[in-house]
Image: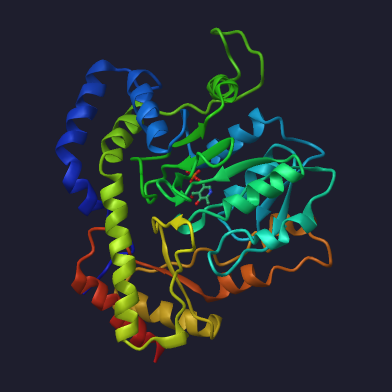
Amino acid sequence: MAVPLLDLKAQYRTIKDEVLRVTEEIYESQIFILGKRVEEFERDFAAYCHSKHAIGVSSGTDALLIALMVADIGRDHDVIVPAYSFFATAGVVDRVGATPVFVDIDLADYCIDVRKIEQKITSRTRAIMPVHLYGQAAAMDEINRIAKKHNLLVIEDAAQAVGAEYDGKRTGSLSPFGCFSFFPSKNLGAFGDAGAVTTNDDALASKLVDYRVHGMRPKYYHHYVGGNFRIDALQAAILHIKLKHLDQWAEGRRRNAAAYIDMFAEAKAGERIVLPTEMPKRHHVYNQYVIRFPEGRETRDRVMNHLKSAGVGCEVYYPLTLPQQACFKDNLSASDSFPSSDAASEQTLAIPVYPEMTRDQMAEVVREIMRGLG
Ligand SMILES: Cc1ncc(COP(=O)(O)O)c(C=O)c1O
């Protein structure tokens, strides 16, 4: 039985009528960029994220970029980022002229290791950008405590973690800027590229709105150099429809994650497979369900190749750490080492967890993983 890593067609079938109705209305209106649809989505998305404001933008990457621009981070500044994330986390820091400074992750939650942040703080450091990787919030109490002590800004990369919580508070509301991606494979996915920034600060919200349209207010008067970071009405309307289902879909992911624990125990996976851990105070939304093979890369690759030949979707997120990327080789000093990030890149594998999965499909995934493990 083939099991895809993600089945967006199954999700689409449940909202198809509503989507077609709204898209038809937008075609009739011929209003494609910003406007009422975007405002409606922003209002409800802000509320969903326990935030005062949400500003829809063109992608998750642009959400991070616009936050850095609004915060005036640039040349001569360092931004602390985890050594293990999607490229955009560090790429945007470089793009504003600042330097991404890498901190190793904690293998317990795959997020930045808060015990290793302070040793990387210098007079150049302006911000910490934690990533809520795979759908679980980073250790935000500790990150905010360190940031306060050193007078640093915190910018959450919440691209993978819409709806995740830390101590009952949703991601995006845990720092001055929450940056979200609505890339189609995210838990809240658009029909193309889109993103949003959340904030509780009125002044920052107003600046974000201006930066989204080239720093312009009123029309053709530019106070800052922003960019074209606008979101399409079509994307906002589709996201607005999906938002109503988001908690139910996340519950499906959580239910599957819980079921995997029993199924791997029954299959006697033992210590050969480390399953994701939901850490204290967190509410994990499992954008990815990432398992780890402590035996190392060879075992991981063997299982991965077996799954692919058996038709079970899986993926390595990510095969290289950020410091290993060719474009960052000059950012490193001889003493830098990132053992947990290295281990994550060598030993982990994302397996299907999407809410529409059946028990039979889950059983197939576990069976094939155990077969591949040998
Ligand atoms: C952790 C992280 N940060 C940033 C991004 C960038 O988002 P987008 O692809 O919407 O630009 C992504 C999405 O792929 C991500 O996973």
How far across and down, in percent of the image, does residue 122 sit? 83, 48
* Residue at the image position 64 percent from the left and 50 percent from the top: 143
Residue 10 in which image quadrant: bottom left
How far across and down, in percent of the image, does residue 149 sit? 75, 45
| Residue 162 shown left or right of residue 347 in the figure | left
* Residue at the image position 44 percent from the left and 50 percent from the top: 165
Q: Residue furthest bottom?
A: 374
Residue 329 in which image quadrant: bottom right
Residue 23 in which image quadrant: top left
Q: Nearer the viewer, residue 217 or 197?
A: 197
* Residue 323 in sight here: no
Count of picture labels: 0
How far across and down, in percent of the image, does residue 128 sit? 67, 46
* Residue at the image position 71 percent from the left and 30 percent from the top: 72
Query: For the C terminus, which image quadrant?
Result: bottom left
Query: For the N terminus, which image quadrant?
Result: bottom left
* Residue at the image position 45 percent from the left and 81 percent from the top: 273
Q: Nearer the viewer, residue 123 or 2?
A: 123
| Residue 79 shown left or right of residue 253 in the figure | right
Residue 310 drawn above or below residue 6: below
Q: Nearer the viewer, residue 360 or 147?
A: 147
Residue 220 drawn above or below residue 48: above
- Scheme by which the image is coloured: rainbow
Residue 208 drawn above or below residue 304: above
How far across and down, in percent of the image, does residue 257 sit? 34, 67
Q: Nearer the viewer, residue 245 or 366?
A: 245
* Residue 38 in sight here: yes
